[in-house]
Image: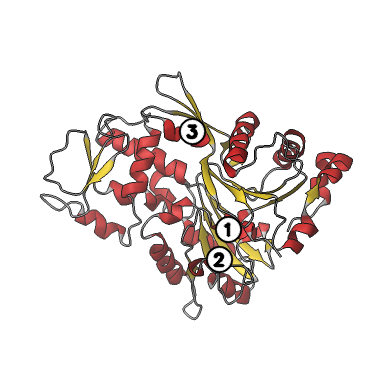
Amino acid sequence: MGLPPKTIVLDNGAYHIKAGFAGGKVVEIPNCLTRSKDGNRLFLGNELANCNDFTTLQFRRAHEKGYLVHWSTETAVWDLVMRNVGVMEPSMADYSLLLTQPVFTMPSIEHNTIQLVFEEFQFDAYLPCTPAELIPWDHGSFTMNQEDAYTGQHGECVLVIDSGYSFTHIIPVIDFSVQEQAVKRVDVGGKLLTNYLKEVISYRKYNMMEETYIVNEIKESVCYVSQNFKEDMEICHEKPRSKLEICYALPDYSTGKHGYIVRDINQKIEQQVLNLSNERFMIPELLFSPSDIEIREAGIPEAVMQSVTHFPENIQAMLLENVVTIGGNCKFPGFHKRLSSELRSLAPANWEVKVFEPSDPICFPWKKASHMPLEHWNANKITRSEYSEHGANIMTRKRRI
């Protein structure tokens, strides 16, 4: 059996919230409050779709460096989320909440979160967990897309690479438990990549330092992970025009409010056009080589190998045979091929390296959480009566999944 019918699953990402009833459909909602260019309009969550001019938008996000700290903003976004998933009651007393939190969430944040859950929203039951904990569960008894059916040979040992908005975590999960002593963090996420692209474009082309929304769209449209960085750099120097160069038409808000790739270079374009070549792969390269911008950290493949060395060799081999990638940065074309290639070169020759690529790495943890077995839920949930008796300290009395 799955979760109780009135359980809301909320994957509380710093960039997007993924939410919905357990076993139902998921909705993605921006986890932010956005102020318009003139400062006269505020857009909460997915209300941003009603904006007609995305220039110089200002964002207030509930998270800082990946952790929830702005509680008033999050409360407002959660109110919107509940309406979007179909909850119209003023109180959530008849509903339960399964919520994801990043690994190493501080106790003070956990305490504030449980207060928000039980005092502000008045949920009947609550279970926090990390997205990585959800990945290895066997859901053979549930109907899921065949392409998303995790079929690792050693399901008790899974290495999760979670690369999202704020950072990238390498998380070994053994016997359904996060091995915190071996977790590695790479301080490169989608926010840093977008900010770096803003700097590069502003230095080389147009000043776009205030155009976070537009540059993020450019990043998602044209960037890819190079399989051979030096070779692609040489190609970009070809004359008269590199085969890697792309023309991107910026939005003018008269013919449209979104930019687009110009497929025909001879097409007459009235909007401003960005010509992008090595920028396309320079930006995602930071995931593999943070030192390019003087971040003194290992890239993702090296961080993976640093993580697995905390275990005996037989466990190391099983972890590298069960690598699962989640998070928005995993959607860059070429990401998985490059990751697999570099892990293969770093691992012993007699070990097998397998990288599992979900069809939707952003919503994959939500899908896993949505099909949590009922026995896991019942064994680990925190009820409102328990919170009333023990307060926020109940977090230290209950073990995680």
Amino acid at dot 1: Lys
The residue at 79%/49% (across/down) is: 382
Horizontal relation, residue 391 to residue 246: left or right: right
Q: Is residue 357 above or below residue 109?
A: below
Marks 1 and 2, how far apart at CA:
9 Å
Residue 388 visible in the current orientation: yes
Which secondary structure lies at badge 2?
loop
| Label annotation for residue 17 | none
* Picture coordinates of residue 391, whole percent (x, y): 84, 39
Amino acid at dot 2: Met
Horizontal relation, residue 290 to residue 141: left or right: left
* Picture coordinates of residue 1, whole percent (x, y): 71, 65
Marks 2 and 3, how far apart at CA:
30 Å
| Label annotation for residue 144 | 2
Marks 3 and 1, how far apart at CA:
24 Å
The residue at 29%/37% (across/down) is: 201
Horizontal relation, residue 53 to residue 349: left or right: left
**Pointer 1 residue:** 367
The residue at 48%/68% (across/down) is: 147
Closer to the N terminus: mark 3 or mark 1? 3
* Picture coordinates of residue 258, whole percent (x, y): 32, 37
Splitting the image into 4 quarters, where does residue 70 fall?
top right
**Pointer 3 residue:** 47
Q: Residues within 10 Å of mark 3 (few under 14, many from 20)?
A: some
Residue 288 visible in the current orientation: no
Horizontal relation, residue 306 to residue 213: left or right: right
